[in-house]
Image (cartoon, rainbow, N blue to C red):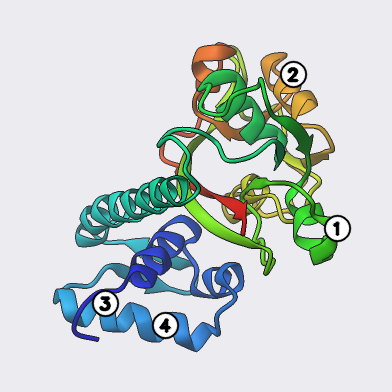
Amino acid sequence: MGIMQTRDYEIFCQLYELRSINATAKALGFAQSNVSTRLRALERELGVELFVRSPYGLTPTEAGELFHNHAQKAVQQLSQLKLQLLNVRRGKREHSLPSKNVIISELLFNYLVVWEKRVALSGNNFTLMGSTDIENCAPDDIVADTVITYAQFRNAHYAASAISYLSADFLGNHDVSMKQVPFLVNSDKRCPFRERTLSVIPQETSSVREVDSWGSIVNLVKAGKGVALLPTYLTETEGLVKVLPKHHFKIGYKTYTRR
């Protein structure tokens, strides 16, 4: 391979998050053999093993943990640069959002608009859509200026301008008993929070329950009726606590802008 490519960083970050070559191949739209080949080439170039392989998936080595910190920063910095260049090309200020109509998921809306205030509420019209709906939309059905999503959004009318990561942990209230409450997942089959939860807790167990609304999931967790993988910032806004500290995720999402 010689010199690492941006795609190698992205593949590694997905492998680190999903802990599965097969799941990573599906998420990126690659052949499984291609992902395996890229990982082996990356390990050869670095001269270290990045993951321990087992029938249960991938476990990062110490070198893998170290490389993940570097890869994540590299992907984010390149994405930020692309967004800045896009704004320059359109004659926009560096931090302005080049859109008026925004399609976004409910959790990302709450995080980026309500909590972080990185996307302005004024001047934008928001449509909340789940990952499955975004993935299944025909190209001409999407008419927004910007799409912010975890989903694998492939639309020739749009270009990915940035990638970022949302920290997530299994959260409950202060009095929750892990033996008495179920794990709550969104009914959207392509939801990354659902996918990460089921990678830890098999769906066929009686401890998993589906709920349609993220607002309902958060309210159930606050009431001590369940545990769910949720954005970590809810420990501050909703007073929730981490209940499975060994399982921490960085869930990637991308911003797509209309060409």
Q: What element carries label 4?
A: helix
Residue 204 in sight in this render: no
Quadrant where the N terminus sits is: bottom left
Q: How far apart are marks 2 and 1 (CA)?
A: 33 Å
Q: What residue type is labelled 2?
A: Asn
Q: Residue shown at 34%/68% (left/top)?
A: 6
Q: What residue type is labelled 1?
A: Asp
Which residue position holds label 2? 219
* Residue closest to the eye, 124 or 45: 124
Q: Which amino acid does label 4 sit on?
A: Ser
Q: How crowded is mark 1: few (under 14 residues within 10 Å), some or many (20 or more)?
A: few
Quadrant where the C terminus sits is: bottom right
In the figure, 144 relative to 119: above or below? Answer: below
Q: Distance between the residues labelled 3 and 4?
A: 10 Å
Q: Residue shown at 69%/22% (left/top)?
A: 221
Left or right of residue 47: residue 90: right
Which residue position holds label 1? 141
Q: What residue type is labelled 3?
A: Leu
In the figure, 46 relative to 87: above or below? Answer: below
Q: Residue 36 carries which label?
A: 4
Q: Nearer the viewer, mark 4 or mark 1?
A: 1
Q: Which mark is residue 42?
A: 3
* Residue closest to the eye, 241 or 151: 151
